[in-house]
Image: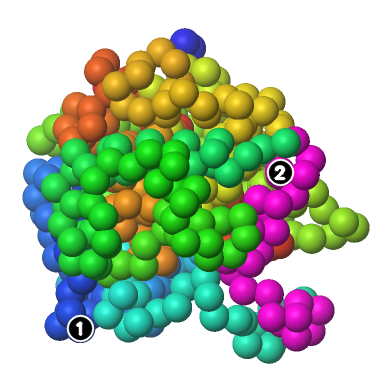
Amino acid sequence: MSVKQRDAAIVGVHEFPSRDVEGELSPLHIKAESASKALADAGLTWSDVDGIYDAGEGGASGLTIAEYFGLSPTVIDTTNVGGSSYQFHAAHARRAIGAGKARVALLTYGSTAHSNVSRIGTGGRGMGGYPADNLESFAGLTLIANYAMCAHRHMFEFGTTSEQLAEISVATRCHAMRNPDAVRAMEDLEFLDIRETTIDDVVNSRMIADPLHLLECCMISDGGGAVVIAAPDVARDCRHKPVWILGTGEATKYPAGGADITSSAAVQSGPIGFGEAGVGPDEMDVAMIYDSFSITVLTILEDLGFCPKGEGGRWVEGGRLRFDRPGEGPALNTDGGGLSSNHPGMRGIFLLIEAARQLRGESTAQVEGAKLAVAHGNGGMLGSRHSAGTVVLGGD
């Protein structure tokens, strides 16, 4: 391992514990509480913050966040590229800190998707939101149908099976059952059978959009969190050992000239992030991968270089993604992921939070001796236009 420069580090994290606020809290309230506790986790105060990063969930602008928190930031970034927004934010915060524009960056997220009864994935898109709507919306393409289309194509091209895709759901549920917040989430959201699952459980669960079954689809929850990123001299004096941002990559992909829907923008962002970090995917102890659906994870694992394109199905077999199988493959989504812990709409921030907990030795499904992690977010729809953000992290 030849790790390159260390410009910034994650020094504080907090994940809002409730997945069902029962309509009593706003996204802004969730952000404020999470921010306060993330700063306390870092041993910093509000007055230390000079950079604000927020994707605007709940209608709050950067100006609104600054006023509500009582801050006078020198940097405000409200980049919104869907679920990978917070990987982009981490990359931007690292660059701002490296350029001397900020010393302490605060990333915040809050959502009440469950309380709002949001039908993420099942509702069609209205006309006018995207340039290509006139070519897609009339056909009734929903978000989940888009991912099902990707899964079908992967099966057709490479012989991937439903049993192989189910390995991803089984691994994340294994980890979720060790996370009290994830178990409570499944209880609050009225999951019917709260236990570790098997391959048969997944493939025999209700079909939602062929070939994706119920247990291959993310939950819809409330939730939020915050991440504090600091300059090296600040990080050294914080409460916990710093988790260094070693490399980042950003990319987008959209349909053009019959684009291949079995690959994602991670093909571009992954090599950039690993290249900056000076490490490779085979060195990762933990992989926090955006798991809106099982096929999302399988595609991204291939595209990040954990295995060749088309071999993901065979590669994930045998439980190699579990936290207690070190050396076989990176532990996947050790908090339980979007499939079994939380998914309020933009899950990217939770990938950073759990990766940091792993590298601090604080996860409920702790990987023994974890030193390196990748947190990769996907925003938009995998089978059409989407963003990809890759963040490679290292322990101190």
Q: How many marks?
A: 2
Q: CA distance from mark 1 to mark 2?
A: 41 Å
Q: Give me the residue at 42% from left, 26% from top.
A: 319
Residue 376 lies, in percent from the top left, at 49, 43
* Residue type pointed to by label 1: Gly
Task: Residue 275 in the image: state x and y as whole percent.
Answer: 59, 26
Residue, disc 2: 155
Residue extending farthest to the right is 257
Residue at 54% x, 39% y is 163
- Depth check: give the residue in front, 378 or 299: 299
Q: Nearer the viewer, residue 40 or 159?
A: 159
- In percent of the image, x 24 and y 67: which residue is there? 189
**Res. 23 mark:** 1
Residue 153 magenta: yes
Amino acid at dot 2? Met
* Quadrant into which the C terminus falls: top left
Residue 67: quarter of image: bottom left
Query: What is the secondary structure assignment of the residue under circle 2?
Result: helix
Q: Describe residue 287's horizontal placement relative to residue 323 as left or right.
A: right
The magenta-colored residue range is: 134-158
Going 15% across and 43% down the picture, which residue do you hit? 42
On whether residue 227 falls in the magenta region, the answer is: no
Direction from residue 85 to residue 358 in the image, left or right: left
